[in-house]
Amino acid sequence: MATIICQNELGYQNGDLSTFTGIVPGEIKRIFYIYGAKGQRRGGHRHHQSWNILICLSGKCRIYCNDGETEKFFYLNDPKQCLVIQPKEWHIMDRFSHDAILLVLANTYYNENDYIYEPYAKDKQYV
């Protein structure tokens, strides 16, 4: 199941710095961010191979995850936290605040064939 991880935070007089290391297998190969999505849903898929790390850099949002057995909502509103989503987890991002910027890091390059758009049976109630 998806997991919230608090990143290492280093405080300095001129600002804070958060780091993460070794959270997903392999290297980070793709970075993108979602913004201007207030009132919209994003995601609605799972993957064959790709792991995702989600960090809400600004504002807040909600993420629904389902691994086929367990379903859970996560709320991101702190840039020191990240949500690690495994490939098998169906996920939907929603409830974006007007100032939300959601950073997504993936350990694979974009590949249309890696996406699975068929939800688990439980997801159909939420979707």
Image (cartoon, rainbow, N blue to C red):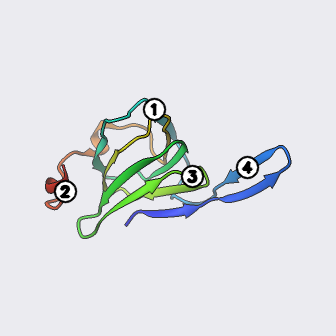
Q: Which residue is mark 3?
A: 78
Residue 60 placement, left or right of 73: right
Residue 82, relative to residue 14: is it above or below?
Answer: below
First along the sequence among labels 1 and 3: 1
Q: Secondary structure at mark 1?
A: strand
Distance, label 2 to label 4, CA atoms, is: 37 Å
Depth order, front residue of 52/38: 38
User: Which mark is first along the chain, 2 or 3?
Assistant: 3
Image disc number at residue 35:
1
Closer to us: 32 or 80: 80
Residue 93 numbered tag: none
| Disc 2 from disc 1: Cα separation | 24 Å
Total labels: the figure holds 4
Instruction: Give, as a three-letter code, the residue at label 2.
Output: Asp
Name the residue type under label 4. Leu
Foreground mark, 2 or 1? 1
Which mark is first along the chain, 4 or 2? 4
Asked if the residue under mark 4 is in contact with the one under mark 2, i.e. CB atoms within 8 Å, the reply is: no
The residue beneath circle 4 is 17
> Mark 3 packing: few (<14 Cα in 10 Å), some, or many (20+)?
some
Residue beneath label 2, please? 123
Corner quadrant of residue 121: bottom left
Cβ atoms at labels 2 and 1 below 8 Å apart:
no
Between the residue at mark 3 and the residue at mark 4, the CA separation in whole angstroms equals 13 Å
From the viewer's perspective, is the residue at label 3 or at label 2 nearer? 3
- Residue 52 image position (x, y, % from top left): 44, 50
Along the line of sight, the residue nearer the viewer: 53 or 47: 53
